[in-house]
Amino acid sequence: MVVADEQYYDYGFIGLSGSYGESVFSAEDEASISPEPNLFYNGKYGFVDGSLVNVSVLPYVGISGQWRFAEVSDDFEDIPTGIQDRDGSGELGFTVGTVGARITFLHDVSSVHDGYEVQAHLGRSFDTPIQNLTLTPYVEVDYRDKKLSQHLYNISVAESAASGLSAHNSGSSWVYQGGLIGIYTFAPKWLALAKFELESHDSDSPLVQRDLGWAMSLGVAYKFTD
């Protein structure tokens, strides 16, 4: 396959997908369906990749911000009964690299957990024999410090009594992610998006219900760049 990264420079889209899968925190042994917004931009002044926004200040260096959506929540997942939702958080930091090969440091600035995360992300887009279809495999490894990990994985005595899970006090942790993204341009301004994603949390918290979370999604997006 031919590398297709150049065609995704000065390129952006916004859309919506339907996602079907199981979170590592889900207490049920059946997948659920949820909506998934899609937002992407890559250009001279930085990039937007989902909830991560990066503004370039030097070549390959940018100021980054992210809203961390609640990972442990019964809004779209069946988390164990008696476990409270973990609030989302606003985070600021910096990124070194590009949208496809980057290291990002993010620290909580919303006083939710006062912790930080370091993300190492690598992805690359390739043309395929099917015209207008590209595939992008990616991997990501995230280090979460003790404060962020405790916010997500701790189980209080009260939660333990209500849920039947053992009380837990977390240390720092790692998250491993990988997946494949397909983009098919079926009209000058319209795209079909397909994703398959895997995620594993290296934590011994009883809140982590399974070793591997997975999701597959399908959606449509509007290309807002020329």
Image (cartoon, helix red, strand yellow):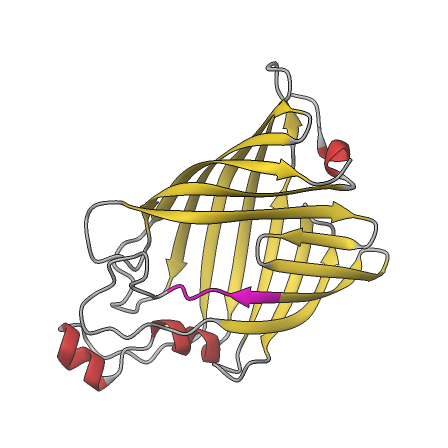
Q: Give above or below for 42 relative to 92.
A: above
Q: In which quadrant of the rendered image does the C terminus lie?
A: top right
Q: Residue at x 60, y 75 (%)?
A: 107
Q: Where residue 58 sits in the image (x, y, percent)? A: 86, 61
Q: Where residue 211 sits in the image (x, y, percent)? A: 31, 53
Q: Where residue 44 sits in the image (x, y, percent)? A: 83, 49
Q: Where residue 76 sits in the image (x, y, percent)? A: 32, 56
**Left or right position of 28 against 181:** left
**Left or right position of 110 against 198:** right
Residue 42 magenta:
no
Please tell me how many numbered marks the rendered image carries.
Answer: 0
The single residue placed furthest to the right in the displayed view is 58
Q: Residue at x 65, y 33 (%)?
A: 125
Q: Residue at x 29, y 63 (%)?
A: 74
Q: Give above or below for 81 relative to 195.
A: below
Q: Residue at x 40, y 63 (%)?
A: 71
Q: In which quadrant of the rendered image does the N terminus lie?
A: top right
**Magenta highlight range:** 66-71
Name the image quarter holding residue 90: bottom right
Name the image quarter holding residue 190: top right
Q: Give above or below for 130 relative to 208.
A: above
Q: Toward the viewer: 58 or 17?
A: 17
